[in-house]
Image (cartoon, rainbow, N blue to C red):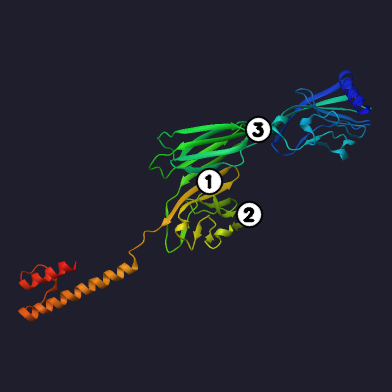
């Protein structure tokens, strides 16, 4: 009862005591993180602090009698608010809000009073932001899909192509709102045949943030003697300071390299990763038909991501060595028969054999040789 009466006294003080109102302060808070709402007052005795959200006059946090008074606190803020208790006596009435939500956005009032000074009001305009953290790009049949989740406020998505193309590309964009009032955005761009040398650039932006990702199809690579080297980009420049990810068929991690150059190879690929160069070039070994497929290189830094997709396939095999041996032996056998028949003709007819003319001479013996060769074929 005493706490409730004190709370009513606070409201009465707000209504009847002359107050000094200050200008608004803008505060930007990241979704899901902690955020401090600043408020200061002249130190004094019997400190009273009262925070509330002006929209609906929602009680956020109260402090008086040297302790928190949360009996009237709105359920929306339960367990998420705190004061800097060791600094309150010095005039710091700032409040920390944890696990920031979109619903926390709005105008807050900080009401303070002491025995020494009249009541004061400060206003904080809180804006919640959830910028795009990661853009995903992948190819599905003849389309490139660009997507990003958990964004606030609702973002814009745009496509561009480098180098610029005169062709018109069809694209479809969808935005879904989650229960947390965040936006999931996805857009598909239809590819055209014969456009292998283009970079497809997807840009997702909000009023205060922007992130960009590009996708390109790299040249196909052949597996030769169980090895293959795949380049991450057309240039061979160093990727020091970038993060790098190589994956297989878009879902199996091969190797990751962080901005501090720390490299990690997945257990499944340790026997196959021979080298990763400073430019991100990946050399693989001990490959088989199971490793045929799509390899994706993703390079990121700051607000930009570059993705290169490369197809890896076995080189066209030469003739089977066993078949080759059989053919060679067959040719040798045929040659031996031809030579033997030629010498037979010489002994019978007294003619000098001319192997190169055996197929065009008109003698009966030569005809029989041609006949026999044809039979052997």
Confirm or deny contact between disc 3 and disc 2 (CB under 8 A). Answer: no
Measure the alpha-carbon separation of dots 3 and 2: 37 Å
Q: Which residue is mark 3?
A: 179
- Along the viewing direction, whichever of 153 and 268 lies nearer the viewer: 268
Q: Would you call the spot at circle 2 few (<14 residues within 10 Å), some (14-19), or many (20 or more)?
A: few
Residue 44's place in the image compared with 136, above or below, is above
Mark 2 highlights which residue?
A: 260
At x 47%, y 42%, the residue is 140
In front: label 3 or label 2? 3
**Image position, residue 175 (x, y; %):** 56, 32
On the image, the x and y values in percent for residue 253 come to 56, 53
Of the pair 315 and 159, the residue shown nearer to us: 315
The numbered disc on residue 306 is 1
Q: CA distance from mark 1 to mark 2?
A: 18 Å
Kindly state the secondary structure of the residue where label 2 is placed. loop
Residue drawn where x is 78% and y is 30% of the image: 75
Q: Name the residue located 92 percent from the left edge and 24 percent from the top edge.
A: 5
- Which of these two is toward me, 224 or 261? 224
In the drawing, does residue 116 fall left or right of residue 228? right
Please identify the residue farthest to the bottom as the structure is shown.
347
Which residue ends up furthest to the top in the rendered image? 16
Question: Which mark is first along the chain, 2 or 3?
Answer: 3
Left or right: 162, with 7 as reference point: left
Q: Provide residue 263's location: percent of width, then percent of height.
A: 60, 57
């Amino acid at each position: 009862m005493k706490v409730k009466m004190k709370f009513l006294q606070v409201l009465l003080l707000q209504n009847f005591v002359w107050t000094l109102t200050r200008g608004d302060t803008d505060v930007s808070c990241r979704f899901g993180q902690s955020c401090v709402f600043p408020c200061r007052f002249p130190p004094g005795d019997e400190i009273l602090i009262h925070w509330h959200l002006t929209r609906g006059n929602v009680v956020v946090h109260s402090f008086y009698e040297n302790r928190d008074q949360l009996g009237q606190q709105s359920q929306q803020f339960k367990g998420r608010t705190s004061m800097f208790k060791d600094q309150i006596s010095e005039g710091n009435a700032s409040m920390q809000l944890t696990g920031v939500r979109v619903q926390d956005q709005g105008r807050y009032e900080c009401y303070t009073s002491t025995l020494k000074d009249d009541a004061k009001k400060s206003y904080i305009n809180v804006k919640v932001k959830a910028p795009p953290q990661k853009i995903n790009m992948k190819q599905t049949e003849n389309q490139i899909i660009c997507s990003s989740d958990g964004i606030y406020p609702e973002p814009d998505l745009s496509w561009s192509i480098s180098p610029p193309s005169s062709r018109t590309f069809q694209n479809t964009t969808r935005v879904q709102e989650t229960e947390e009032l965040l936006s999931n955005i996805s857009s598909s761009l239809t590819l055209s045949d014969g456009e292998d040398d283009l970079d497809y650039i997807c840009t997702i932006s909000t009023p205060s943030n922007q992130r960009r990702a590009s996708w390109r199809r790299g040249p196909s690579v052949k597996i030769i003697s169980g090895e293959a080297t795949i380049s991450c980009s057309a240039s061979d420049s160093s990727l020091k300071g970038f993060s790098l990810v190589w994956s297989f068929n878009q879902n199996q991690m091969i190797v990751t390299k962080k901005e501090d150059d720390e490299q990690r190879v997945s257990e499944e690929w340790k026997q196959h990763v021979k080298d990763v160069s400073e430019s991100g070039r990946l050399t693989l070994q001990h490959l088989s038909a199971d490793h045929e497929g799509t390899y994706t290189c993703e390079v990121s830094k700051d607000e930009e991501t570059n993705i290169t997709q490369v197809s890896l396939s076995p080189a066209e095999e030469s003739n089977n060595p066993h078949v080759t041996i059989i053919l060679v032996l067959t040719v040798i056998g045929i040659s031996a028969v031809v030579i033997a028949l030629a010498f037979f003709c010489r002994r019978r007819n007294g003619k000098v054999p001319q192997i190169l003319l055996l197929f065009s001479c008109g003698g009966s013996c030569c005809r029989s040789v041609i006949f026999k060769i044809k039979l052997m074929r």
